[in-house]
Amino acid sequence: MKVINFCFVVGSAAFSLAILAPSGTSAAPSGGDGGINSRNGSGVARTVSSAGFINESGAFFQDLGTNGRRCVTCHQPGEGWAISAQGVKDRFDDTDGRDPIFRLVDGSNSPTADVSTVAKRRRAYSMLLSKGLIRVERAVPPTAEFELVGVDDPYHYASAAGLSLFRRPLPTTNLGFISAVMWDGREVDPATPMKIANSLATNRAILLASLAHQSVDATNGHAQGASGLTPAQQQDIVDFELGLATAQIRDDEAGSLTSQNAMGGPENILGFPFYIGINDNVADPHGPFNPSAMALYDVWSGSHDEVRKSIARGQALFNNKPIVISGVRGLNDNPYFGSPASFTGSCTTCHNSPNMGNHSLAVALNIGLTDGSRRTADMPLYTLRNKVTGDLQTTTDPGLALSTGKRNDVGRFKGPILRGLATRAPYFHNGFAKDLNAVLDFYQERFAVTFTPRERRDLIAFLRSL
């Protein structure tokens, strides 16, 4: 470990951060008793901090806005530092829909919704209640290669002035391993992304500046802050978030996920190496890609416990189960692959960060989740027209394209870190899959991959153990 000092500017405020950063090989584990354990549907998740304890009195937990929201409102420790649909439902029932998460600014399907009674609040916040979705409002850039020519919004609000985009809050933990901050990468200046060519210190500085900027945006937007954040508050939030590591620590059937030298649990995360491009398979020049990116439960492959063997088999499937990948923007049109119409990969083609499961480069992909053909009745649908060719395209969320203005970026999003999955259903950026079975259903349909009943059980057992 080494201490890296950074000085950068967010808005008009300049401030510095001194943090513990990975050297590129390992990081020191946290002290033992300062973590938080929380129950979920398959066992117990645990969060620890590189500081040795979790300070619940800092800016992350303070009321810094005007509507009662705090960072922790949408980033619950017991829900993987994000939110789960069940957790939101429980809060609604406990407060008749008056908990701070239920605010018209972005918690409701429309900011003009009627919330005068409990029944009306339940309807107004239905996307938050059913899928844990927050409404993000963004406009099409005036210089974009496409224009908005059609809006079908079941909530009668979205327009060219602001598309209603329903997205899951991302976890504010394990952030030292991310290559992009938001689903659509918008908190990072497109001119200065985190990339392989940068030094470790430069990429870390970009990450810190992006997280600091996001803390201001969240306070001003979600919490409707009136005065922004001070440099000290920004630093406190970023330091706190970067120190957190979260993972499943116990499975109800397999027991301790660190037993017999398995590497589950968050303490091990603090020792994992990471840098931008580690184990990457799409950069130029190509790095040494190892498809066996997940190695948490290798030691259980010969276990006498059938549940532990199932988790190890699921990990092997995640690493090696062949998937014919086609029609994925960001992969099949990647010139470093030769822009193949299709090629055979595996889950780790996209989830390649060792033992974490995100992509180690800021590679936003379109796997088809927002295509008009998959639109559900609760989602707005937008029709976009290519300004040059006149071609039409329908989508529920243009994604990265609202930052870049490029038509080929429509529907592209980053993949999240997979650790702590059991804490935060539903899944995908738009809550498309209600549970892990539904996740496999999507991939089975999208890529024509067949899972046998045992493979499905094994993969789910592995994913729940993350």
Image (cartoon, rainbow, N blue to C red):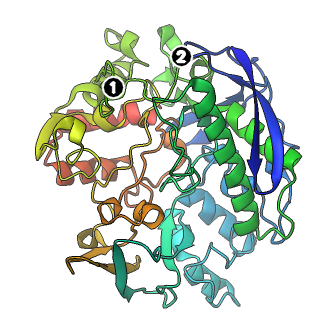
Circle 2 sits on which residue? 258
* Foreground of the two, 371 or 461: 371
Relative to residue 289, is residue 213 drawn left or right?
A: right
Amino acid marked by disc 1: Gln
- Which quadrant holds residue 239? top right
- Which quadrant holds residue 18? top right
The secondary structure type at the circle numbered 1 is helix
Q: Earlier in the sequence, mark 1 or mark 2?
A: 2
Few, some or many C-alpha atoms within 10 Å of disc 1 (few <14, some 14-19, many ≥20)?
A: many
Q: Residue at x 62, y 86 (%)?
A: 119
Residue 286: x, y in percent?
Answer: 30, 25
Name above or below for residue 259 compared with residue 466.
above
Circle 1 sits on which residue? 315
Res. 222 in view: no
For the N terminus, give its image quadrant.
top right
* Foreground of the two, 226 or 370: 226
* Foreground of the two, 405 or 444: 405
Relative to residue 94, is residue 22 drawn left or right?
A: left
Name above or below for residue 429 compared with residue 289.
below
Amino acid marked by disc 2: Thr
Mark 1–mark 2 Cα distance, whole angstroms, equals 15 Å
Q: Residue at x 27, y 59 (%)?
A: 368
Relative to residue 228, is residue 136 drawn left or right?
A: left
Residue 278: x, y in percent?
Answer: 43, 24
